[in-house]
Image (cartoon, coloured by chain):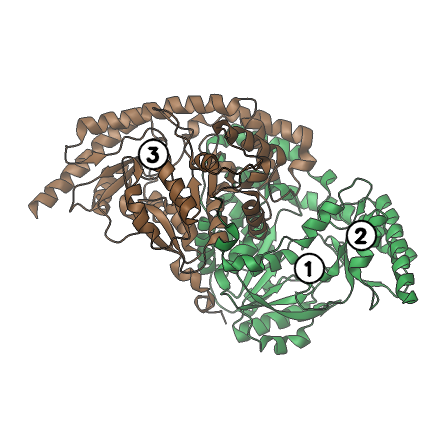
Chain colours: A green, B brown
Amino acid sequence: MSILWESRYALRMERMTSSMIRELLKLTQRPEVISFAGGLPAAEYFPVNRFQDVCQRVLADNAHFALQYGPTEGYPPLREFIAERLSRENFCITADNVLITSGSQQALSLIGALLINPGDKVLVEQPTYLGAVQAFSSYQTGYIGVPTDDDGIRTDLLPDAMRQGPKFMYILPNFQNPAGVTISYDRRVELVRLSQEQGVPIVEDDPYGELRYEGEHIRSLVAIDAELNTSSDDCYTGNVIYLGTFSKTLAPGLRIAYVVAPPEVISKLVQLKQAADLHTSTFNQMVIYEVAKDGFIDEHVANLVDVYQKRRDAMLGALDRFMPPEVRWTHPQGGLFLWMHLPQGMSDRALFEAAVERNVAFVPGGSFFTVPDPPPTARLNFSCVNEEHIIEGIQRLCEAYQEQARTLAAH
Amino acid sequence: MSILWESRYALRMERMTSSMIRELLKLTQRPEVISFAGGLPAAEYFPVNRFQDVCQRVLADNAHFALQYGPTEGYPPLREFIAERLSRENFCITADNVLITSGSQQALSLIGALLINPGDKVLVEQPTYLGAVQAFSSYQTGYIGVPTDDDGIRTDLLPDAMRQGPKFMYILPNFQNPAGVTISYDRRVELVRLSQEQGVPIVEDDPYGELRYEGEHIRSLVAIDAELNTSSDDCYTGNVIYLGTFSKTLAPGLRIAYVVAPPEVISKLVQLKQAADLHTSTFNQMVIYEVAKDGFIDEHVANLVDVYQKRRDAMLGALDRFMPPEVRWTHPQGGLFLWMHLPQGMSDRALFEAAVERNVAFVPGGSFFTVPDPPPTARLNFSCVNEEHIIEGIQRLCEAYQEQARTLAAH
């Protein structure tokens, strides 16, 4: 007699679905497909030698510690390293502000557990990061969507959105996934001001901030918040929970990311993390710390910026050359993604299918919206395809586009 | 203006507290303390050389894969290895039955998310594993406690407990943490029979099953369930979710554990894991697979059994020699823990304090009960203290006990 498992599942499972992106990726893994669908860093630039040396050293010097259980908060030298690095933005932050997580996805999940009661609403950009929606939705949340333009979230529309009572705001300030846009300094100040005025926390998700290919770094929301908060604490005690990761700067396969927040928030997140997975791999934390330290991470990021900038430029150039003028796309100043606005009436899903037939892939933009009837859009990743393939892929995509445009005109 | 964070927390946070064990462990980390309080494997027996060789090999041969994002389900060769290993118990299990998790704690947390609506009740042994209670309580569950004796959970009391409508049963069959007891075969059959009859799933948590120092392996609940379920599927489709881990057999610091369940349950857990942390470290899964394979894990477990058996015997011997007859303790056939029943009226917390003053530590048993007014008990770990220190520590504990007994008699 088998149990009717279906009848035993909790209510939250009704909202859980497998990520469409992950399902699509499975379709596009044939070797002949040029895929702009992923969000992967370029594996050929992982600092493999450094990882080899460091793994060897950590196990030679400190194996009894590295292979043993560790504290939930994280490996102390790594927490200090992160605090020191972030304090480059000139605000008070100490290791007590830092929790190490198993990837930023875990940080999003723990934040959902901390803040969301079923039926609460989260204010999100339109489009927004799908992984965050997945994490938050598992706590049965609703969404308040705010449109974005080339300067990021439309802060002129925020006061109205705030009247709908969001529990918190989820914001990607730099080279947003999926839209590739960056929030201007003035809008950041406006976001922080509104957050402080209305007592609504900001979750600032910043996986790509260090991967900037042009322009100047714009002060992060957490640093602006610390500046506008005139408290005299010796660590950060403000309104922002900041998320960072080593997945894009060193390697995602070790799953090392971090949360920065006031100590009282960190201690609550520690309780949740104890229940969620006890602690993040001791060995991996030590390895990431040893790989990153002594300036290595900055050198390595400089190399990555060089590679990714060329790839972005190749994509922008090919689009300029091959794509008809009715299609618009964003000009990302960094990060991994570019966002394409298709003409009204075209189906991004149909374009995806036509593209896959021509052995090129992207992610249809619909999945990144929490509002119904999103406009037809496409997310294109440029970080894990070389320049030659980018040009070839964009050509194929333009052919698929032309085909769809003809079909559309014929109707 | 700082946010009143407290006012923003979700309802579930009211039930979250930091693990008392972890707080106690902080008190007992002075080097002069002989600690029976932890639950750590013996670090001096970690197979460090093998880990070194394997890390080097994985990074030399396959770094682009090992350091990259991976599938949520887990590294396919590791899933197959686990399926093959478990099929030694002669039941149908394939890689589709296996999900890799970031430690068993994550498995417990995902199972809570899958099955628990706020207010649901979980049937647990008394005492039971604290980490499971922490994981389940974060989903706002209640508990139905069933007493245990030297043969494990009292199945004669189960029918009555089942009438309270548990959502599932959480069972530790082998060398239970904390009590060190093992469920007899007849009681296992009775558990599975009741589970099938009443449609109540069993979560079988088996971190120590391979660490047996005497007696014969007793068939696991999942295998018994598969046997009693006469379906002709070619993979497991029954009523049990089984949890295993490499934390006790190889090393906990890599956080590699696994869930075995029907494929329909695995696919739901995969959705939850995507939201929770995307996937478990690719590198760590490959390392654990390469370390474990070709019979190494069996050889290594045989060595551990040898070491831990001597330590258990040292503890049992010292207790026999020094502890007065009114104190009783369990005789664990394996695992890491022994459980002590103190005389009625004695406070395990007061004994703990007296013991720490004499530089010996254990965990007061109260934390392992979900019912009010638990009897005075103590959990003693014997895996991470050498024999000499075990004898010395038990002597100190007996002195602390005599002191408490005199105080008790004086009142």
- Image location of residue A90, percent across then percent down: 58, 59
- Image location of residue A207, percent across then percent down: 64, 53
Residue at mark 2: chain:
A
Number of the front mark, 3 or 2: 3
- Amino acid tagged 3: Asp
Mark 1 vs 2, N-terminal side:
1
- Image location of residue B251, percent across then percent down: 48, 32
Write the residue at 65% across / 43% down. B69
Number of the front mark, 1 or 3: 3
Which numbered marker is on residue A312?
A: 2
- Amino acid tagged 2: Arg
Total labels: the figure holds 3
Q: Which residue is mark 1?
A: A174
Q: State left or right for residue A363 relative to residue B336.
A: right
Q: Are marks 1 and 3 in contact (CB under 8 Å)?
A: no
Q: Which residue is mark 3?
A: B186
Instruction: Establish if B89 lies above or below A85.
Output: above
The secondary structure type at the circle numbered 3 is helix
The secondary structure type at the circle numbered 2 is helix
Instruction: Specify few, some or many for label 3: CA neighbours under 10 Å numbering under 14, 14-19, or 20 or more.
Output: few
- Image location of residue B394, percent across then percent down: 24, 31
| Residue placed most toward the observer, A385 or B93 | B93
Write the residue at 19% across / 40% down. B342
Res A295 seen here? no
Give the distance between the C-alpha atoms of the residues marked 1 and 2, in whole angstroms.
15 Å
Give the distance between the C-alpha atoms of the residues marked 1 and 3, in whole angstroms.
61 Å
Give the distance between the C-alpha atoms of the residues marked 3 and 2, in whole angstroms.
66 Å
